[in-house]
């Protein structure tokens, strides 16, 4: 069941404030984060229902979802060659299962520390479209 007011369930303006839907799989939505201090940063959101916790997925749902997380991480790695990819699954204020994939680069922004959720400094739509193109091409 989809939930009213959830940006991942409803898409629309709230999602557009921080990300852009790149593409979908059977299980997930891959969203490119508009804050690209970490080149290639994306979110993999569970799309079938409004699920808040990973433990609420069946074993098969979890397998499919994590396969999408893995494929997205591999696509980011191939497209941008980061030194590491950090993974974040937060849900205190937005209770929809989603995982942030945050490429980190040695001596780059926030290397060696926890990534900032959102600096509110966004790149242009054309830059977002280029990131989407690169991730899709390598997915």
Image (cartoon, helix red, strand yellow):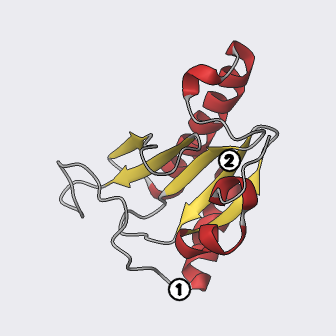
The span from disc 1 to disc 2 (Cα, nearest Å) is 23 Å
- Give the quarter of the figure containing the N terminus: top right
Residue 59 on image: x %, y %: 68, 14
Residue 111 horizontal/vertical position (percent): 21, 54
- Label 1, secondary structure: give it: loop
Instruction: Tell me the SS state at disc 2.
Output: loop
Is the Cβ of the residue at disc 1 closer than 8 Å to that at disc 2?
A: no
Q: Residue at x 32, y 47 (%)?
A: 83
Numbered circle sitting on residue 16: none
- Whether residue 60 is visible, yes or no, is yes
Task: Tell me where residue 75 appears, x and y as whole percent.
Answer: 59, 48
Residue 135 in view here = no
- Picture mark count: 2
Residue 86 position by quadrant? top left
- Between 46 and 92, the residue placed more toward the observer is 92
> Compared to 5, does 27 lie above or below?
above
Q: Nearer the viewer, residue 49 or 126?
A: 49
Q: Residues within 10 Å of mark 2 (few under 14, many from 20)?
A: some
Give the percent coordinates (x, y) of residue 103: 39, 52
In the displayed structure image, the side of residue 56 where residue 111 appears, left or right: left
Say whether residue 108 is left or right of residue 52. left
Q: Which picture quadrant has residue 56?
A: top right
Of callouts 1 and 2, the N-terminal one? 1
Nearer the camera: disc 1 or disc 2:
1
Q: Is residue 23 above or below residue 26?
A: below
Residue found at x 57% / y 20%: 55
Name the residue that disc number 2 marks: 139
Between 32 and 8, which is closer to the camera in this rendering? 8
> Disc number at residue 124?
1
């Amino acid at each position: 069941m989809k939930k009213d007011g959830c940006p991942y369930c409803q898409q629309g303006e709230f999602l557009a404030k921080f990300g852009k839907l790149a593409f979908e799989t059977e299980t997930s939505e891959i969203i490119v984060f508009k804050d690209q201090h970490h080149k290639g940063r994306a979110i993999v959101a569970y799309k079938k229902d409004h699920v808040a916790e990973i433990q609420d997925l069946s074993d098969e749902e979890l397998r499919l979802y994590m396969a999408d997380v893995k494929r997205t991480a591999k696509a980011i790695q191939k497209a941008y060659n980061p030194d590491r990819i950090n993974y974040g699954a937060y849900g205190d204020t937005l209770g929809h299962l989603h995982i942030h994939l945050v490429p980190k680069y040695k001596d780059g922004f926030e290397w060696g520390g926890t990534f900032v959720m959102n600096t509110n400094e966004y790149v242009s739509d054309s830059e977002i479209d280029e990131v989407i193109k690169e991730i899709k091409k390598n997915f």
